Image: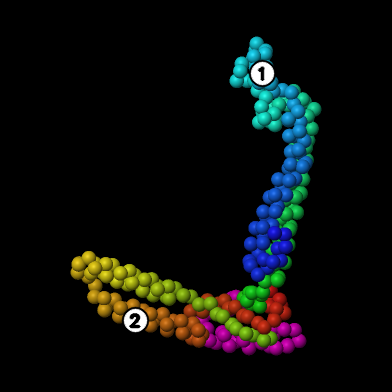
Amino acid sequence: MTDFQQLSYLPPGYAMYFQFRNFTLNVLLLIFCVGGLYNLYTNYYGDFCIEMRNKIVVDAGYIDSEICLKNFSNSLSLQNKMSNATAIYTQQLLNLLTVVILMLYYQKFRYAQRKLAVKLSEQRITPGDYTFMVTNLPKGHGREILQELKDFFTVNGLPDHRPLDIRRIVLTYNVREKIKIERKIDKLARKKIQDEKRRQNGQTPLLNPDHIDEHIREYERKMRLISQTFATGASESFTGTAFITVNTQKGNFKWL
């Protein structure tokens, strides 16, 4: 696949993966064309390895394990041209040239990856393209901050005091208390499952299941109350950070 625009509806990582696959194939092709083809040619037509039928005709100073016997694999190896100093020197130059070309190609590939990621991100519209973050706000009651943010950015969000169409403001809250309640509910649910297994095995339950259900309902009621205070801005656990979603990207770019 070379038309990566067909994957613009997906996150950029998918198209970048296929681009990387093509890149690795091109790297192998570059290595083969620059130095690999010459190396294979000079290796194959080298004369250092000895034909199998001449195995007994060797110098007295060698032993069998040190002799390069000519076969298909040895013919394509570097050892077959050990006696050709010119070919080895040329091969070293070509290997160096290959490294230089690959270094330049790696830089080109990195640039192509960044360019593709930016291009696909521009085509893929997400709520984040219309949302900006406001930090260092005074902590405290969220409802007051919510109204102040809406009034301020509606008037000052665009140049020449043009009104900015704010679609949504999301305040961030400290959810530590909510997490504690969720853990308590999970703990009670595990105890209920354990007691149910004891009952199935004919053992006496350790806890009254009705009491467990009552505690779970009580914690769930507290969870709903906390969620309602977050949704209405009535909570006092505002962390000082808000996300504002606007109707146009112009309003977003002004505050980036």
Q: Is residue 188 magenta?
A: no
The residue pinned by badge 2 equals 218
The residue pinned by badge 1 equals 53
Which residues, given as a range, are shown in magenta? Answer: 134-163
Q: Residue furthest front?
A: 53
Q: Position of residue 248 (x, y in %)?
A: 69, 81
Provide the secondary structure element on which disc 1 rests. Answer: helix
Please give the name of the residue rendered at 61% of the width and 18% of the height, measured from the top-left corner.
Answer: 64
Provide the secondary structure element on which disc 2 rests. Answer: helix
The answer to whether residue 16 is above or below residue 209 is above
Q: Nearer the viewer, residue 119 or 18?
A: 18
The answer to whether residue 207 is above or below residue 112 is below
Q: Position of residue 70 (x, y in %)?
A: 67, 24
Please give the name of the residue rendered at 65% of the width and 70% of the height, measured from the top-left corner.
Answer: 9
Cα separation between marks 1 and 2:
92 Å
Q: Amino acid at mark 2?
A: Glu
Please give the name of the residue rendered at 30% of the width and 69% of the height, measured from the top-left corner.
Answer: 193
Quarter holding the C terminus?
A: bottom right
Quarter holding the N terminus?
A: bottom right
What crowding class fits label 1: few (fewer than 14 Cα within 10 Å), some (14-19), or many (20 or more)? few
